[in-house]
Amino acid sequence: MRAIVSFVVSWMLTALSAGAATPPPLPDCRAPEHHQFDFWIGRWDVTDTQTGKPAGSSLIESLYKGCVLRENWRDPQLTGGSLNIYDTQDGKWHQMWTDSVGADRLFTGGLVNGKMVLETTFRSARFPGKTVLYRMTFTHNADGSVRQYSDISTDAGVHWLTNYDLTYRRAR
């Protein structure tokens, strides 16, 4: 009987130690790709680039050991925000936007000529029956400001219309 108990205990310990192999390390976010969008981090006063009129305010925070950027947007008609992350598996940035009017958008993209370009497609109430290609381009300007230019296309990118053009300046 002792031999059987000893065998079972020995077998269980071997099975447990085999199943408890050290898992591979989790990826961290120290690689430069994870920080390509860090120029957007900060507390911002936002104006319409063309008119200079106030458009809103935004707080962009780095969270979760530098792996995620969280946007918190506020203007007189709308509050909303996004979570932004670099995905090492597909090598792209992803932004999930949601807001106070119930909109949600999942953008995908990355750096193009030093600018962060994120795109999505969706069915638009503004253009009934059409699928809209929606693009946002974030430019880190030499003076430390950030330009967020958005344009849309209803013909798969052949023609583009300005959606908005914003300039982010550090809040005082």
Image (cartoon, rainbow, N blue to C red):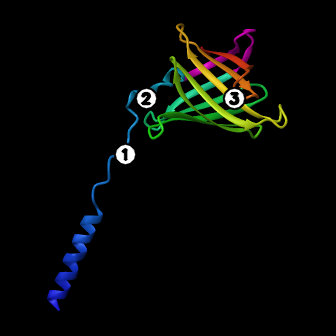
Label 1 element class? loop
Instruction: Say which residue appears at 55% left-offset and 11% top-offset.
Output: 141
Residues in magenta?
42-56
What residue did someone put label 2 on? 33
In percent of width and height, residue 51 lies at 75, 9
User: Hey, what amino acid is under mark 1?
Assistant: Leu
Q: Is residue 163 left or right of residue 139?
A: right
- Name the one closer to the observer, 156 or 81: 156
Callout 1: few (<14), some (14-19), or many (20+) C-alpha neighbours within 10 Å?
few
What residue did someone put label 3 on? 134
Q: Quadrant of the N terminus?
A: bottom left
Of marks 2 and 3, the one in the foreground = 3
User: Hey, what amino acid is under mark 2?
Assistant: Glu
Q: Is residue 64 depicted above or below 142 in this figure?
A: below
What residue did someone put label 1 on? 26
Tell me how far mark 3 sits from mark 1, CA to CA: 33 Å
Tell me how far mark 2 sits from mark 3, CA to CA: 23 Å
Callout 2: few (<14), some (14-19), or many (20+) C-alpha neighbours within 10 Å?
some
Label 2 element class? helix
Quadrant hosting residue 171: top right
User: Hey, what amino acid is under mark 3?
Assistant: Tyr
Is 136 one of the magenta-colored residues?
Answer: no
- Name the one closer to the observer, 122 or 96: 122
In percent of width and height, residue 18 lies at 25, 65
Instruction: Say which residue appears at 63% left-offset and 30% top-offset.
Output: 119
**What is the chief secondary structure element of the magenta stretch?**
strand
Whichever of callouts 1 and 2 sits on the residue coming sooner in the sequence is 1
Whichever of callouts 2 and 3 sits on the residue coming sooner in the sequence is 2
Whichever of callouts 3 and 1 sits on the residue coming sooner in the sequence is 1
